[in-house]
Image (spheres, rainbow, N blue to C red):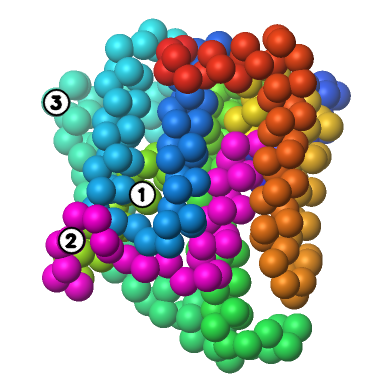
Amino acid sequence: GVGWSMLVFVRFFRRGERELEVAPAQRLELGFLLLATIYSLVLPIRGHLSLMDSAVFLAIFGMYVFRALKSEVEEHPLVGPAAWIHERVNKAGRIAVIATFGVYACYAIWMSAEPFAEGLIFIGGEMNLFGMDADSKKFLLIQLVAPLASESPEFIVAILFVIRHRASTALGALVSSKVNQWTLLVGAIPIVYAFSSGEWNLLVGMELEETPRRELLLTSAQSMFAIAVLSDLRFTLREAAALLVLFVAPWLLAMVPGVEYWFSALYFILVLVVGFRTPHRRRDFARLLRLRG
């Protein structure tokens, strides 16, 4: 809602261009994102996440990685620390440096994740926000602040790509990140829940309460609309504005009962309008399911 749209806005304000062209190779990411999104629609209807869902999502992620490794890769010149490491360190040393960075990042996240989450829950329970009850405030704060903190590094990198005239690469990075979230991240949740609860039932797992079910449906619907928008490999300023407004509006109307269902329905209507209004758009949308770049 914010990240994808902001790339078009930055491009417009920096260069005056009202459209971002998507590289044809990114049909691969969009195709797997569409596949994961279609399956995700089952979850809010069924009302729980199970190990079977983990198997499906991880299988989609594995297929995506396999196809991505076989696709053609466009080489770009290295800059900054990456260029310095490449020039000064041999291959074995580069592997060691990258592994060290990865281990350090995992350690930092491991040490800070629980205090960060507990802090959000505490603040959500103490703050006064539009007369909302404590549980709603906690849920809202976690939804807003946690993604902002976790996704801000990749968002900043994507903005830098746009500034360096590589907008398609920037969008590709965010779309690929979304694929990882919809497959690897969501697929890992039932596994972690099974470890923590000791319940290893393949078909029955973590129950979803009403609020997460509504939000999951809204997220799936928004993902479907975004894919329909990009299916023709063009992302216009008007489409970016629509995606941003439709993302922000449910937050502004959060006190309206069932607002997530209304906006989910609106998203699905827009998918039909945008993705299927002409034979050309229908072919573009269907082509994504070939899962090829």
Residue 200 within the magenta-colored segment of the rendering: yes
Q: Secondary structure at mark 1?
A: helix
**Nearer-N-terminus badge (2/3):** 3
Using the image, tell me which numbered label, if any, was put on residue 185: 1
Q: Which residues are magenta?
A: 197-225
What is the distance, in whole Å, between disc 2 and disc 1 at their CAs? Answer: 20 Å
The amino acid sitting under disc 2 is Asn
Report the number of discs. 3
How many residues crowd around disc 3 within 10 Å: few (fewer than 14), some, or many (20 or more)? few
Which residue is denoted by mark 2 in the rendering?
201
Residue sitting at x 56%, y 53%: 217
In percent of width and height, residue 2 lies at 67, 46
**Nearer-N-terminus badge (2/1):** 1
For residue 52, above or below residue 254: above
The amino acid sitting under disc 1 is Leu
Proximity of marks 3 and 1: CB atoms separated by less than 8 Å? no
The amino acid sitting under disc 3 is Ala
Q: Is residue 80 among what the camera can see?
A: no
Give whichever of 37, 236 is nearer the camera.
37
In percent of width and height, residue 102 lies at 26, 45
Residue 153 within the magenta-colored segment of the rendering: no
Give whichever of 54, 76 is nearer the camera.
54
What is the distance, in whole Å, between disc 3 and disc 1 at their CAs? Answer: 30 Å
Proximity of marks 2 and 1: CB atoms separated by less than 8 Å? no
Using the image, tell me which numbered label, if any, was put on residue 92: 3
